[in-house]
Structure formats: C-alpha cells, structure tokens
Image (spheres, rainbow, N blue to C red):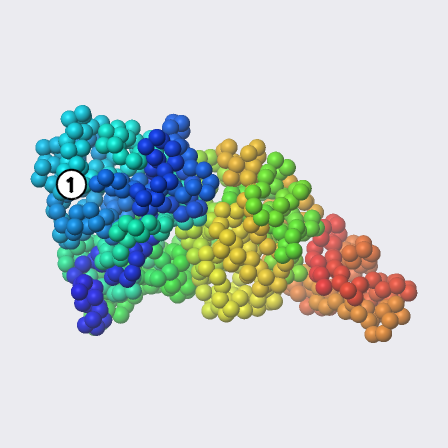
Amino acid sequence: MSALAAATATGPITTILSSEVRAASGDIPPLVCHSTSSFLDASGGELTDSSIIAVWAEDTATNHDADSNGDATLYSSGTSIPLVVSDSNVVAFGSMLVEDGTNWQQGNEEFVLNAWDAELGGSGTVLFDEGHGQYYDLASFSKFESYAENNGYTVTATSNLSADLGSADAAVITSPSTAFSSSELDDLATFVAGGGTLFVHDQSDYNDNDTTANLNDFASYLGLSFRFNDDEVLDTSNNGGADYKPLTSQFNTAFDYFTDRDGLGLDKSKTYTVDVTKVSDGDTVTVQFADGSTESIRILGIDTPEKASNSSAERIQEWEGIESMTYLQTWGSNATDFGKSELGGATVELSFDQNEPLRDTYGRVLGYIHYDATGDGTRDDFYNLRAVETGNARVYGSGSSYHDDIWRAEDTARSNGTGVWGQSDPDASSEIRNRAVDDLFLPQAASVKTASGGVSDSRVPIYAESTATQSGGYTYSGDIPLAAVDDAANVAVVGSPLIDESYESSEGFAVDTSDYENFVFLTNLIDYVSDRSGDILIDGGHGQFDASYAVSNDDAAYYQRYLEGVDLSFDQANDLDTFDLSRWQAIIVTTPANAFTQAEIDALTSFVADGGAVVLVGAGTAPSGARTNLNDLASALGTDLRINGDHVTDGTNNVNGDSGIPTTTVFDTTFPLFDAYDGSTGGGSGGSGNGDLSIAQIHEDAAGNDNNNLNDEYVVFENPGTGSIDLSGWTVEDEAAHTYAFPSGFTLDAGAQVTLHTGTGSDTSSDLYWGNTGTAIWNNGGDTVSVYDDSGALYTSESY
C-alpha cells in the first residue's frame, strides 16, 4: 500500500510521507512533451511503422523548422507525428520529459519509469552520461532520480561512459553537444548487442538547441530503424499551457509503458500538515513535509507588493489608484514582515484548488494556507484572506474558488484606506491613451456573424482591412466584420481579446502597441450598449486565467489603468450567480473554457434586463468547445450575434509583420465609438444626468384590420436614463425605410414614455402621431424598429 493509500485508509490526512504522491488508477494521465522533436524513418522520411512507435502527438499537432536551418522534415497533414520510439534495446524520447520543473500532475514520470521497468525488469543500475557536453545532466533530473531510486534503481552519473558501461544495465543519454568517438560508438553497439538498454532524450530545434546530427550518427551506427528529426512539434489545441508543450494520450498499448502507478504529484484533493521553514515575502513561503522534502509555495489568489530587491517584477498598473513605485516597495517590505510574523516557523495546513493548476510557470506549488493566528490551538485562520483584509495584499485575478471572497476583502480594505491602500486615489490617476480612435490591432482575431449567417452592415462598427483573409467558419464574400452590436439586447460581440497585456512592450512584446486605441474603442462600445452607469466587470470564473485565447483581470492591467484615468474601475468576478452586480454597467466575458451554469445565465439575463451590458470577446485561436460556450451564452442572452468559427489573418496590415495580429482602420463612423471616451456614446454610462432612449413595446397588430385602425398600431419609447433627452432631429424607420421624424424641441423626461401611433392626431408629451392615412407601417409578419439620432447614427433597434 502506498503512503497515500495508507493515510487515506486511516482517516483524514494531516501528514503524508512524501510531498510527491499520486495514487494509481488505470492508465497514466496524458504526457506533456515540453520542447519536443519528432522522429523519422532510417531514410529521413516520415516514420509510419507503428511497431516501433510508442507515442504519437495528437492529430491537432504540427511540426516546423524552428531554427530555420532548412533541415527539418515536415509531416504532412493526416500523418501522425511520432514522439517516442523503441527499437533494438534503444528507447528514444523527443523531449526530456522528466527534468526538474516538469508538471508532475501529468503522466511523464510514470511513463518513463514504466519504460525502464519494461526494458530492465524493474531494477538495475542506470548510468547518466555527462561526458558529451550535455546541458541536461543528472542534477537536472534530481526528482526523477530519487523517484527511480525509490522504485528499485541505482542511478549514477558518469563522464566516461565507455569505461562504466560494463557495470550498468542501462544508460541515459540526453542531447550530446559533442559527438561520440568511433570507439565510443563501438562500445555502445557492443553494450546494446549484449542486452544493455539505452534511453535517449532529444529536444526541439528551438534556438538551435538540439544536437540532432550527433544523435543521428549514433542511430545510424547502431543500425536503428529510426532517426531524430531536426524540428519542433507544436499543438495549439492540446497543450500544457503553450503550443510548444504538446499534450498527448495517443499511446501504442502494444508497449507496456502506460500502466498508472504512484507518481510524483501532490494529491490536490488532500490537505497536508507542513512546517514553514522560510518566508520569502508576503505571498511566497517554503514548507517542509513530514518526510523532509520541501516545496516553494506561492500563496494562491493574492499578490503582495514586490520588495525593492525585486522591483523589476512589479507592475504598478495592478494596484488601483497607486502611482508611486517607491511606496509599493515599502509595502513589499511591510508585507514580508507580516508574512514572517504570521507564518514564520509555524505548522500550517496546506490545501489546493481544483480550479487551478497545482504549480505555476516557475514550478512553485499554488496553495491555500490555514494557520493558528490567535494562539487558540486551531488552524482555522485563512492566511490568503487575512493578508488582504489587513491591506498587505491584493486579490489576484485568477480562477481561484475563493476569488470573490478575497475580492470583497480587498474592496473593503480599499474603501477604508487600509494598509497599502492608504495612498490609493483612483480619481487622481493620470489619464492615458484616451484619444480619438485612428487604428486598432486585433490579435487572434475571429469574425462575428449571426446564428443564421452573416451580420448586416448596420450592426457592424469595425471591419478587417480588404487584405485580410479567413480560414474556417462562415465565409464572407466582402468585408469581414470584427465586432457587432445588438443594442436591443444590450450585447456586443468582439472577435479579439484586444486588451490582452501580452501585447504590451513592457510585458516583453516586440514592439510598442500603445499607439493603438483598443482601450478607447472597447470602452466606448461598452458605453454604447449599456443602459446604465457604473464600473466595468470582467468574468474570470470560467477558465479564462492562463488560457492563451482569453483574458482575466490580471491579464489586462494596462486596460485597468486606462479605465482609472477616465474615472472607471475594473474588477473581476468568478461566481456571477452570487456576486452583487448592481454597481456595474457592463460585464466583459472572454472566451470561456467552461460553460456557464443556468444560475449564472439567469443572473446575467437579469443584469441585462436591468440595463447592464454584456460584451462577449472571442478569439480565432480558441478551441471550438470554448467558442461554443461563448455562443451558447449569447443565445441565452437573447441575441442572434455569434463568434464565427474562423481565424482572421492579414499578411499586409498587421503588427510587426505578424499576420496573426491584424490591424484595421475600416470603421463605420456613424457609430459614436471613435472619439476619445467621455461617457456619452449612449446608454446611462456617462454618469448622472444622461438621458437615454429604448424601445419598450412594439404593438404591430392593431385590432381588426390594421389599415382601418392605424392608431392601435404603435411603438412605445422609454427614457431609462437619469436625465431628459432631446429628440429633435431623431428619426424612426422600418425595414422598408418609411421614416418618422420626432418634432423639433420634443424632450422625453427621465423615466417617461411616449407612444408613437401610426395614424393621425395631436401630439402631446405622451402620444405622438406618424401621420399616415390608410396604410399601416409595421408588418405583422416581422419587421425592425430602428432609431437614429440627430447625427444619423443608429442609436437602437429591435426586431420582432
């Protein structure tokens, strides 16, 4: 029985013998193949011999010549790409698979150890070659080394492989930067012929880091049926967080490599009692498990300011209303002191979040910490929350299950000026990038459409340039729409995560994109479709955080700072069905990896009915299931707008020569979306005293014969705003372009309604008359009521 199984059998877990345990249950989890190459046949062509292929990439994978040396063989569409092969006592892996920092929640370590067991019988001495200039030495595999030794193997490094092969059962060779000598090749061939096994690990040719030629000299000398490819395998759909980390479960079960076993991963369903041995800062500690092993813990769901010694990692944009880096650095030291005083030397409970990965990109464990803050002997104080309550940290815009509780704590701390928030003054934030919209860039773009096909021009404020092209989805014969509005439903759809901070030069992007007006356009669009005032919320509870095609609050810090400059705040909610939505004018929903529950849909439907807006933001690189989730939400909100199933690229008009980041200046300026934001593009979002106009009722079917009862055919308009609205010069049209003009000087008060009758009569403040005689306007079989403001721009419309 494993340590985990034993602990589980005796009741709730408080300690585990190892911090590295995952219970076995059937087949191994998928493999994540970080920076992997593929394999070829002995003649350098595509390898299709399944008798020597143990693992293939998923069908969504492709390979390319990453170092542009022209020496990669590219696999044709429809041919599976091999990632692990086995022939004549040589097992070759396209990547390292088990180097330190590997995501142990996948099946990598189990798979490699299974391969060792299958070839060696479950025990033996394994040499690790360090004599050929390898970057990856045995120290780079320290966790796997311990894992193998705990499972019956002796693992030893050698710088003289030939001299030590006689005492070994197997040898591991990682990418050799220096070639094997003829005598070494002879020794290896003799070793293999005598029953020894070689485990060979290659890597991709990214930055020309591979050593393919040396490996192929070795493969040729041994007469193997495969060769190493000088390539990199990518997968944009199935990956471990980036396309160069292909994820696969395409296993050839003819090989005995895939049985699940205890692995190196922590069990996320368990709570571990650990000792804090070091507090690095307010959100990072080192803990020791009962067996003496240690882990660095990044405290989940919060972020403390960086100390001066790590100021390069600080993004001041994340700290609402704070503009002094020196001030933040002071609070970085304060937060570290707080962490030391609360957790230093303490025994704490470490637990995890099923919605979040176990480790961050730095290999640190992401966890929650409960501890005894009062000395009463119980560990029931939640450090993650307490650090925020005391003003030593902010909420981190992730998918944390506790996000909304922690946000409420931050909201209270900000309101009270607690701790770091003592100098927070969003109203005094400098205005940035707020200017007329001249150019937009739309990374990962998809077009927009309707449920039945194309979207009409009257609903489209921006298009791609004529040089853009589509791949997949509904195909437009003319201009390709990149955003559309449904004013009647209070919904807009945008085909690109255009506020993603990954495209900021300060975040490492190759060029400066601050000259584009993405922030202004999106904020004007929100204002246009919203019927009320308030701040802006973004959904983060549906797998958006860390999804390359979606955006959470922490992925849009620069947009947050822009909004502060125009007196709006920007926050995140994860549980929309329990979050108080009353103070927000709009919710941004970027492509959700997870579907919305009915309770969440009901909350959003009520929000829209109360005048709030929902802006749905898609991506042309999002997987089809995530796009379906977004479109299902659109349908539930009562709009016919959809994200298309295409990817829009532009080889001519783009950012930095990247066709995947199209730019555009093709705007329909009849929409009031292209001036600097001032809160007056529509709806109620411009603040107090703004009027608005909405269509409250359409009564198209008069009693009896419509043509004989024209005044019983009518449309009711309402002003849901907070001030009166002057409708002088405004017009109403049907689909046949019959036009009615509001009387000069006609004003509709806040909260008031006016009924526009088709027939004749005397106008009053509550009843207006089109003036038709004998002919009805509104078709009983369906029509569209369109309202245009005094500039001729479409203000609102409703179809029935």
Question: Which of the 4 quarters of the picture holds residue 463?
Answer: top right
The percent position of residue 427, horizontal first and vertical second, equals 49, 53
Which residue does the image show at 51% across and 44% down from the upper left?
Answer: 444
Q: Is residue 140 above or below residue 703?
A: above
Q: Residue furthest right?
A: 774
Q: Is residue 320 left or right of residue 469?
A: left
The quarter of the picture where the N terminus appears is bottom left
In the visual, does 363 lie left or right of 573? Answer: left
User: Disc 1 designates what residue?
Assistant: 195
| Amino acid found under the numbered disc labelled 1 | Gly
Instruction: Rate crowding at label 1 as few (under 14), some (14 to 19) or many (20 or more) other CA atoms within 10 Å.
Output: some
Q: What residue is at 55 percent from the left and 34 percent from the top?
A: 651
The mark tally for this picture is 1
**Quadrant the C terminus occupies:** bottom right
Q: Give above or below for 223 relative to 770.
A: above
Residue at 74%, 57% in the rendered image: 787
